[in-house]
Amino acid sequence: MVEKIIIIRNEDGLHARPAGVLAKTATTFQAQIEIRSQGTTKSAKSIMGIMSLGLEKGSEITLTANGPDEEAAIRVISELAESGFAHA
């Protein structure tokens, strides 16, 4: 299992478009990927789960991956978050 803390940098937080990019990216990995924020954990592969966390700019999340490609999953999603979900 790999874990990393990430700060949301998007001006508008994780609204529908960046949440969709995150979920779509997460589904490309075999690993189980979860996002934890303020005691709530949701699948990173679920756009509705991500949006239900209500993540705003500056929110701290813990990204966890467990599976055969866990390190790659954390790396790619971290880079995506660092870019401010540039594809969103």
Image (cartoon, rainbow, N blue to C red):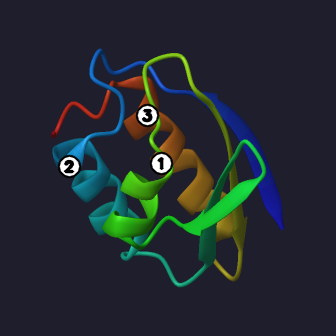
Q: Residues within 10 Å of mark 2 (few under 14, many from 20)?
A: some
Verify CB contact (< 8 Å) between mark 3 and mark 1: yes
Which residue is found at the position 35% from the left and 54% from the top?
22
Which residue is found at the position 27% from the left and 22% from the top?
12
Residue occupied by mark 3: 81
Which is more toward the observer, 1 or 36?
Answer: 36
Image quadrant occupied by the C terminus: top left
**Local SS, label 1:** helix
Residue 67 x %, y %? 70, 81
Which residue is found at the position 45% from the left and 42% from the top?
54
Instruction: Tell me the kind of residue under disc 3.
Output: Ala
N-terminal of the pair, mark 1 or mark 2, is 2
In this rendering, the label closer to the viewer, 1 or 2: 2
Residue 78 x %, y %? 53, 39
Instruction: Tell me the kind of residue under disc 2.
Output: Ala
Instruction: Tell me the kind of residue under disc 1.
Output: Ile
Q: Which mark is residue 43?
A: none
Query: How much space separates mark 3 and mark 1, taking CA atoms?
Result: 6 Å
Query: How much space separates mark 1 and mark 2, taking CA atoms?
Result: 16 Å
Residue occupied by mark 2: 16
Picture quadrant of residue 47: bottom left
Residue occupied by mark 1: 77
